[in-house]
Image: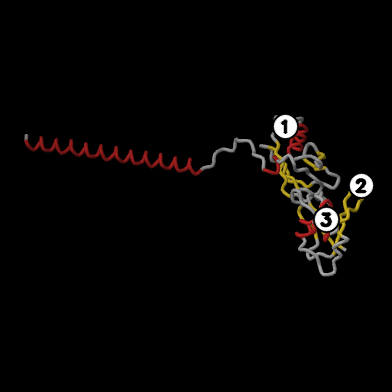
Amino acid sequence: MNRKFLWAALVVLACAAFSRGAQQGNSKKAGGTRSAIAAVRGSSPPANDSKPMASPEASDPAYVIGPEDVLDISVWREPEVSRVVPVRPDGRISLPLIHDVEAAGMSPQQLGVSVTEKLRKYITDPQVTVMVTAMNSQRVFVVGEVLRAGAFPLLPAMTVLQALSSAGGFTTFANVKKVRVVRTRNGKQVEIPFNYRDVLKGEKPDQNIKLEPGDTIIVP
């Protein structure tokens, strides 16, 4: 009887130990599985269900699109229609489905509205974002007797003095009293005089005009 009782007790203890081990193993596996799932969820990017956000250029109401600018036209969830396009010399851009669209003279927001309206014929509720990736139309030119002649980005409220400074100043042969700004108005070129010495002295501050896109400063 004692041997049978001892043997039964050993069997019960062995079963209990095996059961505890199995439970701990399952718990570790479950914990490991949960950790792995959490890690995957944490590292995976969320689904891109949000609408695209506009860049500062796209939301700037003061910027006016011009020829030679480069635009990123993004149509949400429509990659076949989205394009990076240049503004042609005639002020238009070309897009799939709607073909030629007038762009010059508009802000990015206005162009986005125009493209959206035209796409409604082909796409349900199109979401269009327009971003200016290269502002090539916003330039001025400095030529003649300056140290660095060429095209320069037109900064906000940029004046003749500031543009000449961007060009590095004058050469020793420059006639700084006979500088002129050439501007196109209504299809015709006009010349605006600029006497560097007088402006620097504060005698003719009205000659230090704010530049416009396409202005050319000539230093003889």
For the residues marked 2 and 3, what is the alpha-carbon distance in whole angstroms? Answer: 32 Å
Q: Where is residue 16 in the image (x, y as percent from the top left)?
A: 21, 36
Question: In front: 166, or 114?
Answer: 166
Q: Position of residue 45 (x, y in %)?
A: 54, 42
Q: Where is residue 158 in the image (x, y as percent from the top left)?
A: 76, 51
Secondary structure of the residue carrying numbered label 2? loop
Q: Identify the image quadrant of residue 66.
A: top right
Q: Is residue 102 left or right of residue 18?
A: right
How many C-alpha atoms fall within 10 Å of the one at disc 1: few (<14), some, or many (≥20)? some
Residue at (82% x, 39% y) in the render: 102
Label whose residue precedes the other's in the sequence (1 or 3): 1
For the residues marked 1 and 3, what is the alpha-carbon distance in whole angstroms? Answer: 61 Å
How many C-alpha atoms fall within 10 Å of the one at disc 3: few (<14), some, or many (≥20)? few
How many C-alpha atoms fall within 10 Å of the one at disc 2: few (<14), some, or many (≥20)? few
Residue at (15% x, 39% y) in the render: 10
Secondary structure of the residue carrying numbered label 1? loop
- Judging by the rendered image, the residue that carries numbered circle 3 is 203
For the residues marked 2 and 1, what is the alpha-carbon distance in whole angstroms? Answer: 39 Å
Question: In front: 9, or 113?
Answer: 113
Which of the two marks, 1 or 3, is nearer to us in this view? 3
Q: Identify the image quadrant of residue 53.
A: top right
- Judging by the rendered image, the residue that carries numbered circle 1 is 123
